[in-house]
Amino acid sequence: MVLPKFAKQFDFDDWSFDHHSGELRLNYQLEKYGKVTERYHFGAISGERFLGIQVALKKAIQLLHWMAGVSYYKTGLAQDIVFTGELPNRSAASWLQQTWYHGLGELAYQHGISLADHIQVRSTDNQWHPEPIELQPRSLVAIGGGKDSLVSIELLKQHGEDISLFMVGQSEFIESVAATTDCSLLQVKRYLDPRLGEINADDVFNGHVPITAINNCVAAIAALLHDYDAVVFSNEASANQPNVITEAGEQINHQYSKSFAYEQQWQKLIHDYITPDLKVFSLLRPFSELAIVRYFSQLSEYFPVFSSCNRNFHLAGSQNQHGHWCGQCPKCHFVFLILAPFVDQKTVLAIFKNNFLDDVSNEQSFRELLGLSGIKPFECVGEIHESRLALQWLSEHPDWIDVKLVQVLSSEIEIVCEDEIEDMMSFHDVHLIPNRFLSALDKMRR
């Protein structure tokens, strides 16, 4: 493989925010392509509101400016990162460097390169002192259209939490799912530089970026602007596990910016840099994917509308023209596999339109999910032992025991013992959930 050329320099240019229109413009300089601008529309706020939060808001925008630059930085992976404006302090620089390094780990792995000398973030020794802000006790809940965020939404609704849904971008699919929840939706529109598609098609580096870290930054700004004291994500325990460990012992995790390690660093940065009064956390961190889908199986009203297939989210719009599931990607296969033990077969087939386990062309994909071949797919899928337990349960069920891939693959996996099952389906006390929200999880604890 002939590698693209590394750029020598990447520049964080300036940014501007107009509170009258709610438009934020983030500017960067690429060595080969010149100035690029990413835009966000947060909605207008009053001058009084703007004045009351402007110090914290400036810091939150700085963090987004730095994090969102990864979409443009990754095209050249420059060694020299230049800040035209204020340098980050040590904690912010560490957060940026680690998130870019681990968040671009998949890209580096797929290109056979090391980023050890390419992400060096300068910093200042200056100390920032976050200020208290009186925020309303209500929550922005991130929604992506999949099962996890819908579980969080229903748990918080039943708990009596004052919530609004939150999304970044212009996905009609996510909007349609949000409309079924009877909750208000705060939508922040994001516009990548219009030349980015053209740049990505050139001889540059391309691949996965830590999008959840970007969305975390956007959510923090939205919470300050629109007066929410909590931002709730729905990242589960499985997001902590790497897809592959390299020969050098380095963990490559497609979901790094959904991991607990990232969440810990991000929450500390918010409290130390922006304000101690904003809480950003994952409500589902104590649970496995299987425990989450067990609860989701009771929310049948969402079966016709939810999806985790990434073909719904292409820049040009959804690539799924005949339903919400492409049926070909690892995410489709994983959600099918873990939902099937908890829902009757007729309902499963009605959701996905096809029996993915009865199609031998899907065998390699399921082998990777089960750890029988290759590596765990670079997608937001659960742990290998979760997939194995789900298949084990299907192999014991009369509706599934004769299905082709259940027959072929179940004989090749080790039996998951009862202690492992109990651990997999239990609540784990490894999370950053504030006390006010913990009782919302009582219905998931068994």
Image: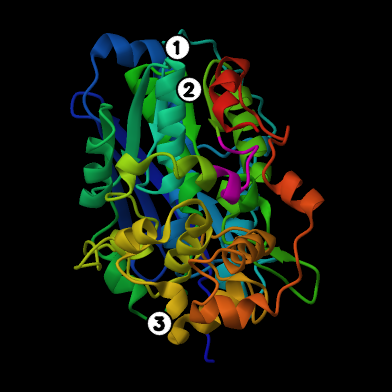
Whether 423 is drawn above or below 49: the answer is: below
The span picked out in magenta is 284-292
Relative to the observer, which residue lies in front, 107 or 196? 107
Query: Mark 1 highlights which residue?
Result: 137
The x, y position of residue 187, in whole percent, is 27, 36
Q: Quadrant of the C terminus?
A: top right
> What is the crowding at mark 1: few (fewer than 14 residues within 10 Å), some, or many (at least 20)?
few
Crowd rating for badge 2 (residues with CA inside 10 Å; few <14, some 14–19, many 20+): many
Name the side, left or right, on which 427 lies relative to 365.
right
Displayed quadrant of residue 167? top left
Q: Position of residue 168 (x, y in %)?
A: 33, 43
Residue 230 - label: 2
> Do the residues under discs 3 and 1 have CB atoms within 8 angstroms?
no
Mark 2 against mark 3, which lies toward the viewer?
2
Magenta stretch contains residue 102: no
Helix, strand or loop at label 3? It is loop
Read off the residue under disc 3: 203
- Callout 1: helix, strand or loop? loop
Residue 85 in sight: no
Seen at 78% across and 52% down, the residue is: 418
Q: Earlier in the sequence, mark 2 or mark 1?
A: 1
Query: Does the CB distance between marks 2 and 1 fall below 8 Å?
Result: yes
Closer to the chain start, of discs 2 and 3, is 3
Q: Nearer the viewer, residue 443 or 282?
A: 443
